[in-house]
Amino acid sequence: MIQIRSIDEPFASQSLYRAAVSALKLAEAMGLLPEQEVIARLDRETMSRLLDRVARAGIGRWLRTELKSPSPQDPARLEKLFEHLAAALEESPAPAHEWPRLAEILGIDQLARLLQVSPSSVRRYKESARTTPDDVAARLHFLALVVGDLAGAYNNIGIRRWFERRRALLGDRAPVDLLNQDWSPTDPAPARVRELARSLLASPAT
């Protein structure tokens, strides 16, 4: 969905570009971008639409107002704004949006295994037939963040295989092996999985 082909000022600034694209990737992984919309242009209009979508999910509403003020014309101010947006997205589970997105990418069975719930429960949560418990919502959000880290390096098939492949940096275990026994995103083992996914930003060989 994110296929940047043209960049307007001031987004040509390398650091601002990274901050804006990072926020876009997180929003995409969380299912907050419009379905089937390909983002090919990075400009204020694109980022304003992003903030509108995110605000409708109850995240970063004040940032939408900030973008429309005169001061964020400055690249440094804009960079800070999108860093704040990325931080808000990191801290804000959005299960109503994340269930459909992750079910599409990972499939019901793998998603259920990673979350330590049954496939039937995944279907009920996804269809809003049952309220997602806080602990499951936290794990779902964690997976969305990991998928966001992986999306720049892998397609959907590659992402699914990444969770199953043994890694030397995980003690010759696969990421799925560390996400077990009602894990929490704050546990050491999931933190290692996230760290490994993030390292892809520096090295595509991970």
Image (cartoon, helix red, strand yellow):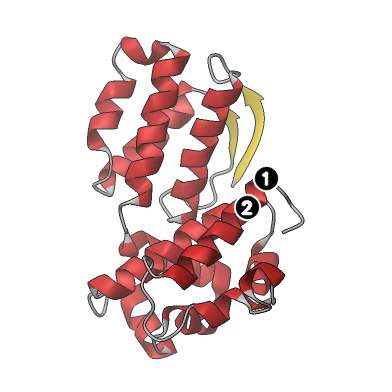
Between the C-alphas of marks 1 and 2, the distance is 5 Å
Picture coordinates of residue 143, whole percent (x, y): 47, 65
The image's mark for residue 119 is none
Contact between labelled residues 2 and 1, with CB atoms less than 8 Å apart: yes
Image quarter where the C terminus lies is bottom right
Residue 101 in view, yes or no: no
Which quadrant of the figure has residue 137?
bottom left
Task: Identify which residue, 197 or 10, lies in the foreground.
Answer: 197
Picture coordinates of residue 83, whole percent (x, y): 41, 33
Left or right, 71 with respect to 133, comes to: right
Amino acid type, mark 2: Ser
Picture coordinates of residue 95, whole percent (x, y): 33, 64
Residue identifier under label 2: 199
Depicted 106 relative to depicted 195: above or below: below
Depicted 67 relative to depicted 131: above or below: above
Question: In percent of the image, x 72 and y 49: which residue is there?
Answer: 203
Left or right, 202 with respect to 100, comes to: right
Left or right, 63 with respect to 46, comes to: left
Residue lying at the far right in this picture: please name it.
205
Depicted 66 relative to depicted 152: above or below: above
Question: In percent of the image, x 28 and y 73: which residue is there?
Answer: 135
Residue identifier under label 1: 202
Which quadrant of the figure has residue 17?
top right
Label 2 secondary element:
helix
